[in-house]
């Protein structure tokens, strides 16, 4: 059993970064995730592991510091919340294009614009469909507990390096701010070997120079690069889909929800079952790649699906694509920092699926 | 006498540095970029630090610098080279890190990154090519374009009342406590080439001292963007650019040079 602690989600991210052997964190304050950098500053990670911590002048600078560090094979990460993540999008596109690993945490707040500092899941499109320019995907992990805020930092870096691709931890203001018990994993030492052929370490006489770039002015070569990326995303779809099911075995109706909405839906499932409705919950853990196959299988025997998200209906598009018309799919979600209660989800279920 | 009799090690007077690739430069004939590439690469070879150097290319005509520089390099988004360099240097304090940026990259879109990297005293080298114009995108106005100077977006000349003033980035960063060495050079004559090389060498040597950022501006020509022959562009540069962007050291060993 690892060390047990009562922590905020944001603090768990920070502690996990130190324990995961992260080399550098670059950030810029924004509510509701400022605790990540504050916790790191208090912990003095340079003393614990030699980890670099730097408050950048903007989110743009922070993501490009990540880009530089990642070019050399270092484990680099940043975190922010929605408006700041928008600023990072150009950098993320470059990281994806140059095939660099990194972890970006988005503790989502309501938008658009400056929006609100209250929780939201309105950045689903941005996280899963691109957000930045060009044909690319991040691998997107959606934690639903403080435990997963910690675990996914480690998992995120494993996946980021496995695929040489940016990984986003798409959290929200609820998971970032709430306190829960968390079992911390044992610290992993920082890596000191940088031998992979893409890592910039300084050209020695016995090898060719190494270049990290997302640019190719030769269209044929650029298309080949695009195709290689597509092949990589396909591999992610084959190997990295993660989801959790709750009372799905005999379910006639299904909630699909991630992050804090999944926690709320779990309660609704219990209430609905007490009322005699056979309802289950599928919680996608990876939002990209999406558990489409599993949803498609389940759709054969479902009378209806409710996509529950703190937004105006974003993930529902992936649910609909997955079930491909096999069953009815509806959306329910509050916005602007308002959070649906289990009872409100139940009402929506009754109204949209039972009637 | 046969050619073979002449090609002997003892007769060698000049050799291209191994730090440049065989690739033909993509720069317009007469452009200063190629010379600055060569000087930078020669300095790394002479200091024997190639194996410990990581370069950051920016966005501009020199975006493909990594094709010509035979060293490990990354390519940063437009304006963000010093942020990327910060990420590298903070993780690898023992490496030599440099950025190679144009005036659009460094003094317009990347102003915040430039100022803050300088102000934090990041311990790397910035090579800043100031040609008063956006070369790569076809000769538009840059933040450094002189008053009255023509460009494709100031076809009647830069009107300061409408388009603002040119910015002297080098004087500006010299005021910041984090810069250790700030100088302005050119590469349009053999004498200036030698001076510029010396400056670049100091800027790399300084990284060993860990005392802050070394900033080398090269006032350069963009004969294509200025729509001049290379020779005319050099004369125009002497007559128009140098009075506004005077050559010489601005800050040495962390102290402003009083003139
Ligand atoms: C975000 C972004 N905006 C605009 C551009 C287009 N762009 C490419 S190079 C350039 C200007 C480069 O000028 P400068 O830095 O002066 O370098 P030069 O080409 O003169 O050497 C611009 C605006 C871009 N690549 N990315
Ligand atoms: S456009 Fe100007 S800066 Fe670019 S290569 Fe040609 S002369 Fe040089």
Image: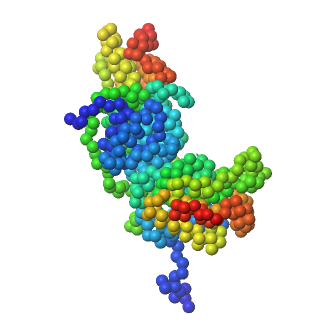
* Residue drawn where x is 32% and y is 8% of the image: A275
What residue is at 41 percent from the left and 19 percent from the top?
Answer: A305
- Is residue A194 among what the camera can see? yes
Front-most of residues A43 and B17: A43
Counting from the top left corner in percent of width and height, residue A97 is at 48, 47
A122 left or right, relative to A20: right
Q: Is residue A138 left or right of residue B168?
A: left
Rendered image coloring scheme: rainbow
Residue projecting furthest to the front: B258
Position in image of residue A346 (x %, y %): 39, 13
Q: How many marks?
A: 0
Q: Position of residue B240 (x, y in %)?
A: 73, 62
Report the front residue among A79 and A275: A79
Above or below for A272 versus B174: above
- Whether A293 is drawn above or below B63: the answer is above
Residue B218, relative to residue A182: is it above or below? below
Q: Quadrant of the N terminus of chain B?
A: bottom right
Pick the front one: A261 or B246: B246
Picture quarter with the C terminus of chain B = bottom right
Q: Tell me what residue is drawn at x 54 percent, y 30 percent.
A: A114
Q: Position of residue B16 (x, y in %)?
A: 52, 73
Q: In the orientation shown, which residue stands out farthest toward the right?
A: B156
Residue at figure coordinates x 48%, y 58% from the top left: B212
Query: In terms of image quadrants, where is residue A199?
Result: bottom left
Left or right of residue A55, residue A285 in this image? left
What is the residue that sits farthest to the left in this orientation? A1
Q: Name above or below for residue B14 compared with residue B19.
A: below
Res. A242 visible in picture: no
């Amino acid at each position: 059993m690892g060390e047990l602690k009562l922590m905020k989600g944001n603090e768990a991210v920070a502690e996990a970064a130190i324990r995961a052997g992260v080399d550098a964190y670059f950030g810029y304050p924004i509510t509701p995730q400022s605790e990540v950098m504050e916790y790191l500053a208090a912990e003095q990670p340079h003393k614990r592991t030699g980890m670099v911590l730097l408050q950048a002048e903007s989110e743009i600078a922070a993501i490009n510091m990540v880009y530089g560090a990642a070019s050399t094979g270092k484990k680099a990460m940043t975190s922010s919340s929605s408006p700041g993540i928008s600023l990072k999008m150009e950098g993320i596109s470059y990281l994806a294009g140059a095939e660099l690993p990194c972890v970006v945490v988005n503790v989502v707040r309501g938008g658009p614009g400056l929006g609100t500092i209250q929780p939201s899941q309105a950045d689903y499109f941005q996280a899963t469909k691109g957000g930045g320019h060009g044909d690319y995907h991040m691998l997107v992990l959606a934690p639903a507990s403080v435990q997963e805020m910690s675990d996914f930092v480690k998992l995120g870096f494993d996946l980021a390096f496995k695929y040489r691709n940016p990984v986003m931890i798409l959290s929200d203001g609820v998971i970032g701010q709430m306190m829960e018990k968390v079992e911390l994993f044992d610290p992993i030492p920082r890596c000191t070997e940088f031998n992979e052929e893409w890592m910039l370490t300084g050209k020695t006489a016995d090898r060719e120079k190494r270049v990290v770039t997302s640019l190719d002015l030769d269209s044929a070569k650029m298309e080949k690069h695009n195709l290689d990326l597509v092949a990589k995303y396909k591999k992610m779809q084959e190997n990295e889909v993660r989801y959790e099911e709750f009372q799905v075995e005999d379910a006639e109706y299904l909630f699909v929800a991630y992050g804090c909405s999944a926690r709320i839906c779990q309660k609704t499932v219990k209430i609905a079952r007490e009322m005699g409705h056979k309802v289950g919950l599928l919680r996608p853990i990876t939002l990209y790649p999406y558990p489409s196959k599993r949803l498609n299988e389940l759709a054969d025997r479902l009378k209806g699906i409710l996509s529950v998200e703190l937004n105006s209906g974003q993930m529902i598009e992936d649910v609909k694509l997955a079930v491909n018309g096999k069953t009815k799919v509806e959306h329910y979600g509050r916005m602007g920092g308002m959070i649906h209660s289990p009872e409100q989800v139940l009402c929506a279920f009754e109204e949209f699926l039972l009637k | 006498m046969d050619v073979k009799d002449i090609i002997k090690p003892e007769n060698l007077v000049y050799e291209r540095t191994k730090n440049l690739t065989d690739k033909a430069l993509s720069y317009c004939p007469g452009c200063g970029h190629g010379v600055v590439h060569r000087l930078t690469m020669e300095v790394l070879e002479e200091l024997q630090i190639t194996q410990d150097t990581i370069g950051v290319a920016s966005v501009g005509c020199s975006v493909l610098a990594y094709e010509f520089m035979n060293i490990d390099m990354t390519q940063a988004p437009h304006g963000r080279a010093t942020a990327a360099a910060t990420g590298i240097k903070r993780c690898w304090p023992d490496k030599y890190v440099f950025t190679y940026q144009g005036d659009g990259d460094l003094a317009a879109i990347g102003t915040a990154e430039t100022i803050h990297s300088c102000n934090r005293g990041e311990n790397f080298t910035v090579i800043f090519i100031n040609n008063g114009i956006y070369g790569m995108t076809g000769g538009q106005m840059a933040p450094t374009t002189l008053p009255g100077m023509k460009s494709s977006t100031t076809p009647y000349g830069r009107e300061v009342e409408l388009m603002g003033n040119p910015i002297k980035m080098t004087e500006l960063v010299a005021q910041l406590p984090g810069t250790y060495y700030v100088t302005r050079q050119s590469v349009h004559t053999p004498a200036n080439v030698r001076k510029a090389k010396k400056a670049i060498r100091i800027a790399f040597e300084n990284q060993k001292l860990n005392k802050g950022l070394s900033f080398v501006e090269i006032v350069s020509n963009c004969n294509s963007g200025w729509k001049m022959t290379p020779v005319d562009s050099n004369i125009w540069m002497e007559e128009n650019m140098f009075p506004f962007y005077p050559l010489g050291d601005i800050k040495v060993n962390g102290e402003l040079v009083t003139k």
